[in-house]
């Protein structure tokens, strides 16, 4: 059923010469006015949104009123109310018709209004316009939200955090007037500098130093200079340096002295060979085949420390944010190398890096590149980086003569190709690249995690899963999960309590939260598990709703806001974000590598209207408190482009199997009500832990699919 929307006294009136006076004095009842009347008289209607009314009420054409439906399914707890499958659709309004557009927006968010004034009322105050009400409810985007965010942060009087928050806003939020925002909040941002210098009042030197600190953060975050945003800073103090050549040599030497003696024989052989190539300045590509638990991350960090201790420039990247946080100075490959978002768009893609830029300078001097979890990235990403390095370093050698150390496990997931076939995934795999013939393959074979256990039978069964050699049923091609691999659970609820026992008491221990997660193949399953566990968490729930807008305003009427709200593209936060203090979340965007990468896990410590305070759970910076603002995120994977302004967070009691790749956990639950659908997913889920006793799996009958492409392992 189509539902009308209009301003007060703005309903359509149809008249002729004979009835014009009657229509003026007694205009017809629109569906919107009838909705207001219904909410005045019917208590159940007061609980509904305008678009939900047709499901429970029918439109009486003659009386122009809504009447309760007689036929349908009874609604529990509401005698006399039945529901049907009828849908309500509010007529679309173009955003240029601002007030009416805002009325429509409010009708989709406010339940049971009895007149237009109810739509304008926010926290007991009647706003002057519907647009003002939308802004106060966070349904529209404007610079005031950034102002409010800084004001909220200022309550806690932590200048360094507020400067960092301002840096993120400059980098990602497209602020229309950053200078005005700085002028309003510069004193609270520089208060620690004032106290340090023991001055009686603020002066330009203090503000200049505050801007210099922000500039250093800005360069680290996105490689831009603060002057590009219209700020005037003492240029003599501005340094263009990403600090890739500034390391604590004493600390690095201490790490080497402590860790080198712990290398196993296989690790030591690889370590010495790669270091020899770096010292000889003889560019070479290595691939370290490293199943889970073989000490790969330990070895990679030692290689980075050795190179940097010898005053070499070493770049550490990973294909996932989680893996990047485990490397010293690690960043995601897309963030570091400015890889195109759509690698398939050009025949020969290159990175968006200029030779005279900060990153270009680092590349020119680079001796070592470490790339972890390389098996899950398209070959076109490596080829783009190869072309860029050759161009910037003016060399025809692969990667410009830098030593490249790739690490990963082809038993794990391969590059994701939307709507692709297994052949497409294999073709996108690194092994299909022209670079693969130049790669020297070396392996880590000893499972260190299993060595610390009483038996290594878990590691052996795990490799059988990865190699696809578990016995398969000839009828449905499923595998039975052997008792040496995991503990089978019979009910979903049992899985949740096995991984998160006594959640109500243990959630305050960050170490306890850090070491466990539930994994599932599908996003919908992950979302439902997260909401189930959030309910068990003590405390009040807070709901944040995104602001969604279509990028092409000419097509705005074709894609109403409620349709945009329903979309959940990959890598985008939900329109409705439900959170509690103490809930674990995962970051969905690279904000400041390596500290805050896509995939970094955090725990919520404070929920405010415009910012969220959280403590980092994973990586080298675990334990640090950070402010997270709302970030505009644009999706390009649909036939149209739309922008969502929301906190770049998702609950992370549970996560997808693919998202967990690169992470080591102590306790894992695999929820396999829907079976794994891609190469290596079962292996990835099982290999996050080192002991059978800490792996719990729910399946419908203790059997599941184990998809393995043998071509990827050859």
Image (spheres, grey):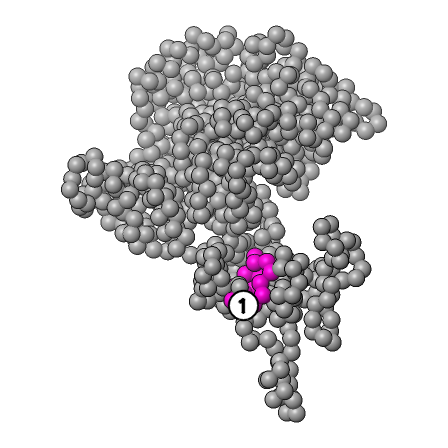
Q: Check the image and name the residue furthest to the right.
A: 475
Residue 200 versus residue 485 in the image, above or below: below
Work out which quarter of the rendered image holds the C terminus and state it.
Answer: top right
Asked if the stretch drawn in magenta spans residue 89, the answer is: no
The image shows residue 432 at horizontal and vertical percentages of 60, 31
Q: Give the residue at x 49% y 62%.
A: 121
The image shows residue 539 at horizontal and vertical percentages of 52, 38
Q: Nearer the viewer, residue 638 or 657?
A: 657
Secondary-structure class at tag 1: helix
- How dense is the environment of label 1, judged by Cα within 10 Å: few (below 14), some, or many (20 and up)? some
The span shown in magenta is: 100-117
Report the residue marked by disc 1: 116
The image shows residue 3 at horizontal and vertical percentages of 65, 67
Residue 435 versus residue 97 in the image, above or below: above
Res 64 → quadrant: bottom right
Q: Is residue 490 visible?
A: yes
Q: Give the residue at x 74% y 57%.
A: 81
Res 78 → quadrant: bottom right
């Amino acid at each position: 059923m189509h539902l009308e929307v209009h301003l007060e006294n703005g309903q359509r009136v149809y008249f002729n010469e004979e009835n014009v006076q009657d229509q003026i004095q007694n205009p017809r009842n629109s569906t919107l006015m009838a909705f207001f009347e219904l909410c005045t008289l019917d208590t159940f209607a007061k609980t509904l949104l305008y678009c939900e009314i047709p499901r429970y009420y029918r439109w009486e054409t003659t009386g122009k009123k809504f009447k309760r439906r007689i036929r349908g399914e009874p609604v529990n707890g509401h005698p006399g109310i039945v529901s049907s499958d009828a849908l309500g659709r509010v007529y679309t309004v173009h955003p240029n018709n601002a007030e009416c557009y805002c009325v429509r927006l409010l009708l989709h968010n406010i339940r049971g209004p009895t007149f237009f004034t109810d739509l304008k009322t926010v926290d007991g105050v009647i706003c002057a316009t519907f647009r003002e009400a939308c802004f106060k409810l966070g349904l529209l985007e404007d610079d005031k939200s950034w102002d409010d965010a800084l004001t909220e942060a200022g309550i806690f009087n932590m200048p360094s955090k507020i400067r960092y928050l301002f840096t993120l806003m400059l980098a990602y939020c497209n602020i229309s007037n950053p200078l005005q925002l700085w002028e309003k909040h510069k004193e609270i941002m520089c208060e620690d500098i004032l106290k340090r210098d023991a001055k009686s009042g603020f002066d330009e030197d203090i503000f200049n130093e505050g801007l210099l600190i922000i500039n250093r953060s800005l360069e680290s975050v996105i490689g831009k200079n603060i002057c590009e945003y219209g700020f005037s800073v003492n240029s003599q103090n501005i340094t263009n340096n990403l600090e890739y050549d500034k390391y604590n040599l004493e600390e690095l030497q201490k790490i080497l002295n402590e860790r080198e003696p712990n290398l196993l024989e296989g690790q030591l052989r690889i370590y010495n060979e790669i270091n020899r190539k770096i010292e000889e300045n003889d560019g070479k590509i290595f691939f370290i085949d490293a199943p889970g638990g073989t000490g790969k991350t330990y070895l990679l960090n030692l290689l980075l420390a050795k190179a940097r201790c010898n005053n070499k420039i070493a770049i550490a990247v990973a294909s996932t944010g989680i893996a990047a946080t485990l490397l010293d100075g690690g960043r995601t490959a897309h963030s570091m190398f400015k890889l195109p978002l759509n690698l398939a768009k050009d025949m020969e893609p290159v990175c968006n890096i200029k030779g005279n830029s900060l990153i270009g300078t680092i590349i020119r001097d680079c001796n070592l590149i470490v790339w972890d979890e390389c098996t899950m990235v398209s070959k076109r990403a490596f080829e783009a980086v190869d072309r860029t390095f050759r161009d910037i370093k003016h060399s025809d050698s692969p990667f410009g003569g830098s030593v490249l150390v790739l690490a990963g496990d082809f038993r794990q997931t391969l590059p994701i190709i939307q709507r692709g076939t297994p052949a497409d995934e294999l073709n996108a795999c690194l092994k299909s690249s022209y670079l693969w013939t130049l790669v020297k393959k070396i392996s880590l074979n000893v499972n260190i995690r299993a060595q610390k256990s009483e038996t290594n039978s878990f590691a052996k069964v795990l490799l059988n899963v990865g190699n696809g050699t578990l016995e398969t049923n000839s009828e449905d091609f499923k595998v039975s999960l052997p008792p040496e691999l995991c503990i089978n659970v019979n009910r979903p609820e049992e899985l949740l309590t096995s991984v998160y026992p006594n959640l109500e008491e243990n959630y305050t221990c960050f170490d306890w939260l850090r070491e466990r997660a539930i994994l599932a193949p599908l996003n919908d399953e992950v979302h439902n598990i997260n909401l189930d566990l959030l309910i068990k968490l003590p405390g009040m729930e807070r709901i944040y709703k995104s602001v969604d807008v279509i990028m092409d305003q000419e097509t705005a009427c074709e894609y109403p806001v409620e349709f945009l709200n329903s979309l959940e593209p990959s890598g985008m936060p939900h329109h409705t974000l439900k959170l509690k203090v103490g809930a674990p979340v995962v970051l969905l965007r690279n904000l400041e590598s390596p500290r805050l990468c896509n995939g970094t896990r955090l725990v919520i410590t404070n929920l405010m209207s415009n910012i969220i305070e959280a403590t980092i759970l994973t990586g080298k910076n675990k334990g640090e408190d950070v402010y997270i603002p709302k970030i505009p995120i644009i999706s390009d994977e649909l036939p149209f482009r739309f922008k969502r302004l929301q906190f770049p967070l998702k609950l992370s009691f549970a996560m997808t199997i693919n998202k967990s790749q690169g992470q080591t956990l102590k306790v894992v639950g695999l929820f396999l009500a829907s079976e794994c659908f891609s190469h290596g997913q079962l292996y990835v889920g099982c290999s996050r832990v080192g002991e059978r006793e800490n792996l719990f799996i729910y399946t419908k009958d203790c059997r599941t699919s184990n998809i393995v492409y043998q071509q990827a392992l050859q």
